[in-house]
Image (cartoon, rainbow, N blue to C red):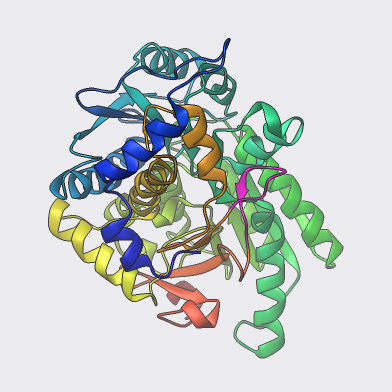
Amino acid sequence: MSSSFGHRLRTSVLLSTAALMAFSMVSCTVPTGESNESGSTQGNITLGLLAPLTGVAAADGKLMEQGAQLAVDEINAKGGIDGRKVELKALDVRDQKSDAVSAAVTQLTSNPDVAAVLTGYASTTNFEIDQLAEAGIPYLLSGNSAQTGDIISKNPEKYPGVWSLAPSYEGYSTGVPEQLEAWNADGTFPLRNRKAYIISSDNAYSNGIASGLEKNLKAKGWEVTGPDTVPFGEVDDWTTQITKIRQVDPAVIINLDYLTANASKFLTQFRQNPTQSLVFSQYAPSVPEFTELAGRNADGVLYNLPFAPLPALPETKELTKKLTDKYQAEPSLYSFGLYEQVYLWADAVRAVGDPGKRSEVGVALGKLDTQTTLGRVHFDPATHLAVAGKDGIPMTYYQIQNGKRLNIAPEEFADGKFQRPEWMK
């Protein structure tokens, strides 16, 4: 592991001419039948970014682009990669449908200047992994880790350059039941019943989490209603779900529709006549747009993240300030995730000595062991996911209080404590 985040940030991205010369001496002969990678050794180095820049997830796409651009700007300000500037080429995957994603990927794979491709998430199934692996282009993701793990674990050797900064999402299925038990046991939130109402969105990501939550809650003696599945896409009216919730009167509501506008509308409509229930909302509250849309209705909502910037770290405070100062807006998960992805790629390039050696850079990514604002990043060779847990990237829990997102667990990373939502007082 690198000695410190600060050291990695400031010194790892600049490749010396001597290092490149040394690399050339040992690799100037390419074995018969092997490609010379991108073949691009002059001019700018292009990093491709797949992001939902328009559509219902545009707020996420904007954050992805901002985080990646800040890192690129920092690298270029320090001289680039051996004097070559890095250029970020962002392509819109819009609604994450296959035609939009495929079109964007084709643009990138047909461009010899593209050294690597980054994303928070591009499609809902991660089918594009195969396209980028076939093209031999390193691909770093930060979302849909269940889909990534399912694809890669069947044949890890087929995907030597595909790596996920997001660890296993298994914690989404196990974490909430475990945290509820802990809060019940220590008196933080005594359970008035063991009823849970689960809402899912009709996509592979949400449905997978819903299935796991249902199983794990039932194993702990909960009575589970749902998953009550809504269509994937814009949902304006939550009357049907809220009416059912009032009939069930659960201790906990879990809404797995991760689209920011949908989740904020649910909470706003729920708060008009709420039940005495905790509300866990999947991912959406982590996006700054959520509190802009929900306003004071957002206060009290809970969410957890399998990877997130750890606010107790001084490095996180430093990066938060840089992002806020540059963009005059609150950063979020994907601001940090894409910033870190750019630097992980730069670390791998430094190890290899040439950004054009895409296959070797992809392999080098998998060998990294680096401290970041998200925790320690090193990868599971069987799934190519970042290792989860205290020795890797921890699952963290948050609550919005007075318009601010506070980390309330684990205690060692927390900058706040759980508060009973005002609608339950």
Q: How many marks?
A: 0
- Magenta segment: 379-388
Residue at (23% x, 40% y) in the render = 82
Check the image and report above or below for 383 versus 355: below
| Residue 305 on image: x %, y % | 52, 59
Query: What residue is shown at x 32% (from left), y 57% (from top)?
Result: 291
Would residue 23 appear left or right of 131 to someone viewing this image? left
Q: Residue furthest bottom?
A: 186
Q: Nearer the viewer, residue 263 or 113?
A: 113
Q: Is residue 218 left or right of residue 389?
A: right
Q: Is residue 2 magenta?
A: no
Rendering quarter of residue 159: top right
Where residue 317 appears, as percent x and y from the top left, is 29, 71
Residue under the image location 42 percent in, 12 percent down:
106
In the rendered structure, does residue 381 fall within the stretch colored magenta? yes
Residue 135 is left or right of residue 157, and the answer is left
- Coordinates of residue 332 in the picture (x, y in percent): 34, 55
- Up-down relation of residue 184 to residue 359 (above or below): below
Say if residue 257 shows up in the picture. no
Q: Position of residue 65 (x, y in %)?
A: 28, 39
**In front here: 301 or 362?**
362
Give the dominant element type of the magenta stretch: helix, strand or loop: loop
Q: Using the rendered view, name the quadrant where residue 391 is placed.
A: bottom right
Residue 108 seen anywhere in this rendered image of the structure: yes
Taking depth in this image into account, of 326 and 33 the one nearest to the observer is 33
